[in-house]
Amino acid sequence: MITGIQPTLEIPLPKPIDRGRPFTALAPMQDVTTLGFLRLLGEYGPPDFLFTEYFRVTVHSKPEQHIVDSVLHHGTGRPVFAQMIGESVPDLLRTAGLLSELPIAGIDLNMGCPAPKVYKKNVGGGLLREPQTVERLLAALRGGIKGRFTVKMRIGFDSIDNYERLLGSVADNGVNLLSVHGRTVKGGYRSEVDYPRIAQAVRTVPCPVLANGNISSAAKAQAVINATGAAGVMIGRACIRNPWIFRQIHEQWTGKPVFEPKLSDVRGYLEVLYRTITDPSQQERYRLARLKKFLNFIGVSVDPEGVFLHRARRVKTWSELQQLADQFLIDNGKADLSYRDEPWPGLIARPNCEGQENRACSL
Ligand SMILES: Cc1cc2nc3c(=O)[nH]c(=O)nc-3n(C[C@H](O)[C@H](O)[C@H](O)COP(=O)(O)O)c2cc1C
């Protein structure tokens, strides 16, 4: 038998849940897509692909154990891609080698993180300023990674001037799957998503492209597939607000009735969240602080004035939050009301992005 590096585009992607339909993927989200949240999504309806939060690669780094645990124990039955962030080829290859011993579907390179602490070190989104570095990096990683090699990128740093060249590097280096977040690094998380630039990637690279950015509902997923021709959608923040979103998309794409969560389902979700994404060995105030990160996203679809969101940010105990949740999601006939598909206009989760102070961002 011939061993060694395979012609990589010939390694097919794992099959989607619904044959012949677009893929769905969970976007990597540092400190959100942890083991607990992956498990939770497994219960509510997992996507076709999962991506880990990024493994930070430096000269002395070792794959962070909590992310390794998320790969080993998520239990969703769906393939996981392990994401790395870094710029040193030897360290990235060393890390890729270690990660390849885990049950992963492939290795993903982060070329989009917009946190200044990160991009100032020319990693993540910072790489997009230097297309020649990207060329070198992709060629070296493609040559050294035996299995699937995937890339997640934004469309540029502060402009799209390098975009065509960056796509050329992806095309020339046998990347197996490309996820495009249709914003520049400087566009952060609030600028318009440039779907035509995602369509450009679809036309330019030979591998499947996942469209990413503001895909907030099953209807929006369909609209983005229609507008871009992408092979699938990658969804981040919307699945914190609506953990049923992947199930809804799959139901929509297979012509089944689409699940419509009621406010009572959201009440149940809060209980599940508290149990799964917070650490029971921690003091209640720390557990609550962590839960509030997620509540920020959920609250934008509860009441149009944002009163729940405002009060939820200020509760001091879990039981206070439970009472507030009952008041807004259960009492006086609210339990049977539908949970809004999209955020109420004008309500914003704050912060709604990767924190700059985040430990893993201090690369
Ligand atoms: C809290 C948070 C953490 C994130 N962490 C990562 C990360 O580790 N790696 C990465 O490539 N993108 C990361 N992102 C970006 C998302 O993967 C995604 O590209 C972005 O949120 C846009 O998609 P959305 O509009 O569906 O949320 C993060 C985003 C958020 C909100």
Image (tube, rainbow, N blue to C red):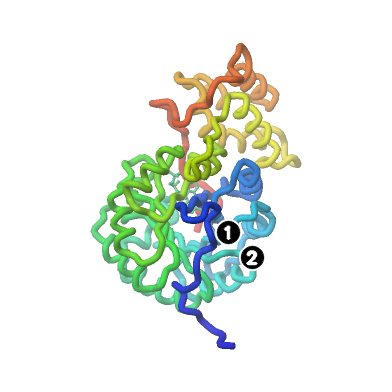
Answer above or below: position of 324 versus 144: above
Q: Please report contact status of discs 1 and 2: CB closer than 8 Å, yes or no.
A: yes
- Residue extending furthest toward the left: 161
Answer above or below: position of 16 versus 302: below
Q: Which residue bears the numbered disc 2? A: 103
**Where's residue 221, x and y in %?**
42, 43
**Where's residue 35, x and y in %?**
65, 50
Find residue 104 and report its image quarter. bottom right
Q: Is residue 124 visible?
A: no
**Label number found at residue 80:** 1
**Where's residue 58, x and y in %?**
52, 67
Q: Residue at x 52, y 41 (%)?
A: 251
Label 2 secondary element: loop
- Residue extending furthest toward the bottom: 1
- Residue extending furthest toward the front: 255
- Residue extending furthest toward the right: 281
The answer as to whether callout 2 falls within 8 Å of ligand 1 is no
Q: Is residue 270 visible?
A: yes
Amino acid type assigned to the residue bearing label 2 in the image: Pro
Answer above or below: position of 30 versus 96: above
**Label number found at residue 272:** none
Q: Residue at x 46, y 71 (%)?
A: 88
Classed neighbour count for the residue bearing mark 2: other residues with Cα under 10 Å, few (<14), some (14–19), many (≥20): some
